[in-house]
Image (tube, rainbow, N blue to C red):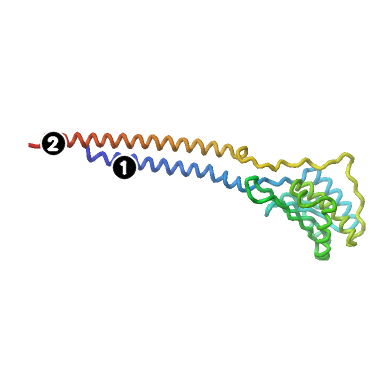
């Protein structure tokens, strides 16, 4: 009986080790997506369908009057959120059908409230090779006269990007780069789209992960407790068996 006790102890220890390994892997599988998603920040929304449709219509009239194509691109890091031009929604302006073109490119990034980094917007006005880079830079600077500064792009990225595209024909005409742009007026009562919710609620967005992790940790604690109690019981049983064996040997001794 004494020789069989170490085998039981080894089996119990191996079982506890496997339980710990499986639990750690399961917890990691739940925590890793939460960490990755938590660091990715919020998703920048595209312009609304109405904003895209109205912008394409205005750019079409401007392109016909000035013989210059206009477009927009909204990006979030390396990801394209929205693109369009006078050629249509989803069609980039640097198209073979447009030998002369100008577009506004807005790269907007929202960061989580828990991050030390701030939200930011990078605005650039690009054009075909026959436009001087200095002129395009001055056109880009002129966007602020329409209230289209970095803060506006951060607060309303979709609306600001399409409004900047609509302002391009007027700004180019002011620089003498094209004929005067056709006048377009906003519909009565028109108002900017409501601001998107940029708040970052970690618990609201990740509660499922945390609940799963909490459950797994509770199971782990219970398994450790059961394993600890079982090992103590096995040690006590082994000690009693060794004591009984020693007593028998003592009685047999002459």
Task: Kindly indicate the quadrant of the structure image that contains residue 137.
Answer: bottom right
Direction from residue 223 to residue 27 in the image, left or right? right
Disc 1 marks which residue?
Answer: 10
- Which sits in the foreground, 23 or 245? 245
Q: Residue 48: horizontal and vertical position, in percent?
A: 77, 43
Q: Quadrant of the C terminus?
A: top left
Picture mark count = 2
Q: Nearer the viewer, residue 75 or 65?
A: 75
- Which residue is at the front of the view, 63 or 188? 188
Tell me the quadrant of the picture where the N terminus can be found. top left
Residues under labels 2 and 1: Cα distance?
29 Å
Question: What residue is shown at x 25% (from left), y 39% (from top)?
Answer: 4
**Which is nearer the N-term, disc 2 or disc 1?**
1
| Residue 251 rendering spot, x and y as whole percentages | 12, 34
Residue 38 position within the rendered picture, expressed as x and y whole percent measured from the top left: 60, 45
Vertical side of 251 occupied by 117: above or below: below
- The residue lying at 48 percent from left, 37 percent from top is 216
**Under tag 2, what secondary structure?**
helix
Q: Which residue is mark 2?
A: 250
How many other residues sit within 10 Å of disc 2, few (<14), some (14-19) or many (≥20)? few
Q: In screen coordinates, is 48 left or right of 201? A: right
Q: Residue at x 47, y 35 (%)?
A: 218
- Nearest-to-viewer mark from 2 and 1: 2
Q: Is residue 45 above or below residue 132?
A: above
Secondary structure category for the residue under label 1: helix
């Amino acid at each position: 009986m004494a020789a069989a006790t170490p085998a039981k102890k080894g089996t119990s220890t191996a079982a506890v080790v496997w339980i710990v390994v499986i639990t750690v892997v399961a917890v990691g599988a739940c925590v890793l997506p939460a960490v990755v998603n938590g660091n990715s920040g919020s998703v920048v929304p595209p312009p609304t369908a109405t904003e895209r449709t109205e912008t394409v219509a205005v750019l079409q009239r401007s392109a016909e009057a000035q013989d210059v194509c206009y477009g927009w691109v909204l990006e979030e890091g390396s990801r394209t959120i929205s693109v369009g031009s006078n050629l249509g929604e989803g069609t980039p302006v640097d198209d073979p059908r447009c030998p002369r073109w100008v577009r506004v490119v807005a790269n907007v990034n929202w960061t989580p409230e828990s991050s030390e980094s701030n939200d930011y917007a990078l605005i650039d006005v690009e054009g075909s090779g026959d436009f001087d880079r200095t002129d395009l830079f001055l056109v880009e600077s002129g966007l602020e006269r329409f209230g289209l500064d970095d803060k506006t792009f951060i607060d309303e990225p979709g609306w600001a990007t399409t409004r900047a595209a609509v302002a391009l024909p007027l700004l180019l005409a002011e620089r003498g780069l094209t004929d005067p742009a056709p006048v377009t007026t906003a519909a009565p009562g028109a108002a900017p789209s409501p601001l998107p919710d940029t708040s970052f609620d970690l618990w609201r967005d990740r509660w499922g992960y945390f609940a799963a992790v909490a459950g797994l940790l509770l199971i782990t604690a219970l398994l450790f407790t059961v394993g600890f109690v079982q090992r103590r019981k096995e040690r006590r049983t082994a000690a009693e068996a060794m004591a009984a064996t020693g007593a028998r040997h003592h009685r047999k001794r002459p």
